[in-house]
Image (cartoon, grey):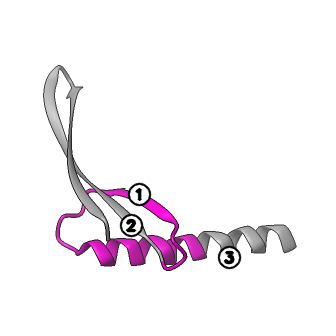
Amino acid sequence: MLKEEHIHLKYYEDKVEKTLCLRKITYRDEKGNYYEFICNNFEITNFEIAFLYKKRWNIELLFKKLKQNF
């Protein structure tokens, strides 16, 4: 894990200003590739977020392969 940043975005909903709090995580894998993940979950660790995104990407690749073959 290289870096964690907190991002605060302001937006308007029904003429009321609101703030969206996000978390940006910079991660480098075993091969040296850099990834940046944005999430709004502040309860789990940086490593868990990177792990979940990695597993999610594998699921996306599986569905892509299934679509191509069927």
Q: Which residues are magenta?
A: 30-58
Q: Residue 27 at x, y = what percent?
A: 39, 67
The residue labelled by disc 2 is 27
Q: Which mark is residue 36?
A: 1
Q: CA distance from mark 1 to mark 3?
A: 22 Å
Callout 2: 10 Å neighbours few (<14), some, many (20+)? Answer: some
Q: Amino acid at mark 3?
A: Leu
Q: Amino acid at mark 1?
A: Glu
Q: Which mark is residue 62?
A: 3
Q: CA distance from mark 2 to mark 1?
A: 6 Å
The quarter of the image holding the N terminus is bottom left
Q: Is residue 13 magenta?
A: no
Specify which label sits upstream in the sequence, 1 or 3: 1
Q: Are marks 2 and 1 in contact (CB under 8 Å)?
A: yes
Foreground pick, 35 / 58 = 35
Q: Residue 64 at x, y = what percent?
A: 72, 67
Specify which label sits upstream in the sequence, 2 or 1: 2
The quarter of the image holding the C terminus is bottom right
